[in-house]
Image: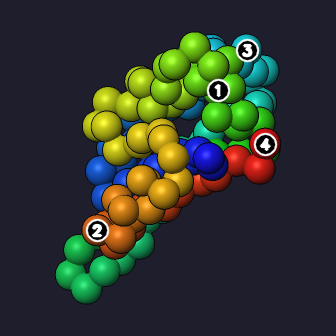
Amino acid sequence: MKYGLYIDYDWCSGCHACELACKQENDLKLDQWGIRVIERTYQAEDKRVIEYIPIPTEYCNLCVNRIAQGMKPACVHHCMTKCMDFGPIEELSKLVEKKKKSVIWGSNK
């Protein structure tokens, strides 16, 4: 069974808790990120829009040690808005079908 990380971009508040949790869990250096929250700003019709987009990087291992212990990845556990989840890709794909701005990041490991 393949597992993945689900991210709902509509609900990310840009708090960066996922970044910090990942860095601490994986003992990453200052210039290393397992997940990085990118800010995107643009003009849409009559309003300015700010979006926050968490993006896993090459350093993301989906917290294999936590998963082996039956826990969710650190980024999911510490997400304040609960815009992230972890589980079988088959189940997560049902969430993506319902959301306009969401993705599943899978693992090839």
Q: Residue 109 carries which label?
A: 4
In-front residue for pair 73/23: 73
Mark 2, other Cα within 10 Å: few <14 / some 14–19 / many ≥20: few
Amino acid type assigned to the residue bearing label 3 in the image: Asp
Marks 2/3: CA–CA distance: 35 Å
The figure's colour scheme reads rainbow
Determine the secondary structure under disc 4.
loop
Is residue 99 found left or right of 28 in the rendered image?
left
Q: Can residue 24 be seen in this view?
A: yes
**Of marks 3 and 1, which one's residue comes earlier in the chain?**
3
Amino acid type assigned to the residue bearing label 4 in the image: Lys
**Of marks 3 and 4, which one's residue comes earlier in the chain?**
3
Q: Which mark is residue 27?
A: 3
Nearest-to-viewer mark from 1 and 4: 4
| Point 76% across, 31% down: residue | 32
Q: Which mark is residue 14?
A: none
- Per the image, the residue denoted by label 2 is 98
- Per the image, the residue denoted by label 1 is 63
Which quarter of the rendered picture does the C terminus lie within? top right
Marks 2/1: CA–CA distance: 26 Å
Residue 108 lies, in percent from the top left, at: 77, 50
